[in-house]
Image: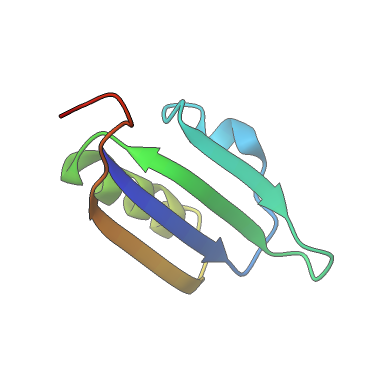
Amino acid sequence: MKRIHLVLTSRIDRDWFAFAERLDVSHTSAGATVIDGLLRDDAAFYGLLDQARSMGVEIRALQYAGEQRGGNEE
């Protein structure tokens, strides 16, 4: 799993990101959409970016971290 933090310039409904069940979608008072959470792999990451691109939304900020492991894994 990889952690993502993505800020989009427009308000996007959570339903557009229903394919990614481990994402939290929120909105700022300025009308931006903030997406935080875990993606299973790079394909899911690029799928998310493609979804934003197909809606014509600009990306304001993006952080995509390496592998995230649960607290019980060794």
| Image point (46%, 58%), residue name | 5
**What is the image's colouring?**
rainbow
Q: Position of residue 14 (x, y in %)?
A: 63, 37
Residue 44 versus residue 50 in the image, above or below: above
| Image point (40%, 59%), residue name | 53
| Image point (28%, 48%), residue name | 45
Residue 23 versus residue 3 in the image, above or below: above
Q: Position of residue 59 (x, y in %)?
A: 48, 70
Q: Residue furthest bottom?
A: 60
**Foreground of the two, 69 or 56:** 69
The quadrant holding residue 66 is bottom left
| Image point (76%, 62%), residue name | 28
The quarter of the image holding the N terminus is top left
**Foreground of the two, 68 or 4:** 68
Residue 51 versus residue 7 in the image, above or below: above
Q: Position of residue 33 (x, y in %)?
A: 64, 57
**Foreground of the two, 29 or 73:** 73
Q: Residue furthest right?
A: 29
- Horizontally, residue 4 falls left or right of residue 18, namely left
- Horizontally, residue 64 falls left or right of residue 15, namely left
The quadrant holding residue 30 is bottom right
The quarter of the image holding the C terminus is top left
Q: Position of residue 34 (x, y in %)?
A: 61, 56
The quadrant holding residue 49 is bottom left
Tally the numbered discs.
0
Residue 8 versus residue 74 in the image, above or below: below
